[in-house]
Amino acid sequence: MPRTSVQSHPPGRNATRVPVPTVTLPAPMVLRLDPLTDFYERLLSVGTVEAIYADWRPDGLEMWLIVYRATEADREQIYNHELSLMQAFPGLGVDTHLIDRSEVDPVEAVDLTAVDAFLRFPRSAHA
């Protein structure tokens, strides 16, 4: 229940005391919009990720991450972000495919007619 404070006016004939509600806000909370946006935000720090193709399935989210020349360190970072995503959205099925554009043509690996969303990272002009 919000606390109230009383604001008084200078004395006079029409002086009234009006309760003014004040609200105490909880500690800062993390806002999670949706799993796909959350994952995109997490991957912004990984320089080799160029795009995400995503498809919503009855059991969760299937995603294809397009990377370019990802090192083992990059891949480990991506997998850690995927684990964090699953922890942030318990019960969400997540199926992620990593496609390195230097090895495989993404157009051949992803059925673009079955994709619900495409997110390109700002640094990429190729995905």
Image (cartoon, helix red, strand yellow):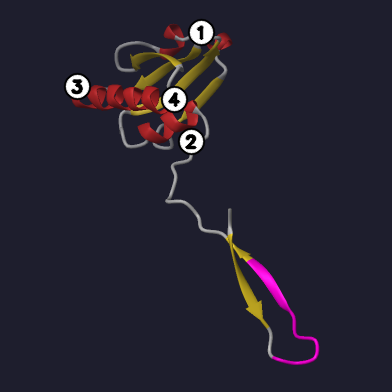
Judge depth for marks 2 and 3 and give the one in front.
Answer: 2
Cβ–Cβ under 8 Å for marks 1 and 2: no
SS at mark 1 in the image: loop
Name the amino acid, label 2. Answer: Arg
Residue 67 visible within the image: yes
Task: Look at mark 1 in the image and give the residue it sits on.
Answer: 111
Q: Which residue is mark 3?
A: 72
Q: Count the marks.
A: 4
Image coordinates for residue 104, horizontal then vertical, percent: 34, 10
Q: Residue at x 51, y 8 (%)?
A: 111
Taking depth in this image into account, of 23 and 118 the one nearest to the observer is 23
- Quarter of the image for residue 113 reads top right
Q: Is disc 4 placed on a helix, strand or loop?
A: loop
Along the polypeptide, which appears first: circle 1 or circle 2? 2
The residue singled out by tag 4 in the image is 89
Answer few, some or many: residues within 10 Å of disc 2's Cα (few below 14, many 20 plus, some between 14 and 19): few
Determine the residue positioned at 44% across, 7% down.
Answer: 108
Q: Which residues are magenta?
A: 11-20
Q: Position of residue 63 (x, y in %)?
A: 44, 16
Asked if labels 2 and 4 touch by Cβ distance under 8 angstroms, the answer is: yes
Question: Would residue 14 be counted in the magenta stretch?
Answer: yes
Q: Is residue 30 magenta?
A: no
Please identify, in this view, whether the residue under mark 3 or under mark 1 is nearer the observer.
3
Separation of disc 1 and disc 2 at Cα? 28 Å
Magenta part, dominant SS = loop
Label 3: state its secondary structure: helix
Numbered disc in front, either 1 or 2: 2
Q: Quadrant of residue 40?
A: top left
Q: CA distance from mark 4 to mark 2?
A: 9 Å
Question: At x 50% / y 18%, what residue is drawn?
Answer: 54
